[in-house]
Amino acid sequence: MSLKKWFYRDGRPNRVARVLDRWTAALYARGIAPDRLVELEVPGRRSGATVTLPLVMTVVEDERYLVSMLGETTNWVRNVRAANGAAAIRHGRREEVCLEEVAPERRAPVLKAYLSRAPNARVHVPVAKDAPLAEFERVSPEFPVFRVLPRNGA
């Protein structure tokens, strides 16, 4: 098992991954990384406390997207759904956003672009980064994709 896969066995970060995620999220929030690396802030669905984590943002046709490399059952995906998409992203500055879930049949191009930008995700997504779009269409129902929109009134 690769180290990258070991960090997120069973779709959940282990203790080491949680520490590393907190550290990298703090760096991303301060803008100390390429602009594709962001910190997501979302209210916890049970506690209401703000949960932060580092993510890779992908841009396709001038639209920004966030992808769950670990699939449907990750906490951040469930938290975003419970918050009706209300979240914030940080990269040097904080931006209030609405995350709109993309239908599975429209996810394939975003997943393909995401794997080009997020090399650590490749171990979790069972498709080669240069595979034909049809391969991404086959797995797209398993990997939630959210379009990043400005939050109304923000």
Image: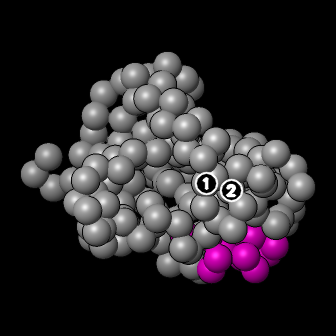
In this view, the residue in front, 51 or 29, is 51
Question: Quick one: which residue is furthest to the front in this view?
Answer: 15
- Mark seen at residue 13: 1
Residue found 56% across the figure and 26% down from its top: 34
Q: Is residue 149 visible?
A: no
Q: Amino acid at mark 1?
A: Pro
Question: Was residue 60 drawn as part of the magenta stretch in this picture?
Answer: no
Q: Which residue is mark 2?
A: 8
Residue found 50% across the figure and 78% down from its top: 103
Residue found 53% across the figure and 31% down from its top: 24
Residue 33: image x %, image y %? Answer: 54, 23
In this view, the residue in front, 35 or 59, is 35
Residue 12: image x %, image y %? Answer: 60, 61
- The range drawn in magenta is 134-144
Residue found 64% across the figure and 42% down from its top: 16
- Mark seen at residue 136: none
Report whether 82 appears left or right of 148: left
Task: Evaluate if marks 1 and 2 touch, with contact meaning CB atoms under 8 Å apart.
Answer: yes
Q: Tag 1: Cα neighbours inside 10 Å, few (<14), some, or many (≥20)?
A: some
Residue 117: image x %, image y %? Answer: 68, 42
Q: Tag 2: Cα neighbours inside 10 Å, few (<14), some, or many (≥20)?
A: some
Q: Is residue 44 visible?
A: yes
Residue 104 position by quadrant: bottom right
Separation of marks 1 and 2 at Cα, in angstroms: 4 Å
Residue 98: image x %, image y %? Answer: 29, 58
Question: Was residue 141 drawn as part of the magenta stretch in this picture?
Answer: yes
Q: Amino acid at mark 2?
A: Tyr
In this view, the residue in front, 71 or 56, is 71
Report whether 86 appears left or right of 79: left
Question: Quick one: which residue is furthest to the left in this view?
Answer: 153
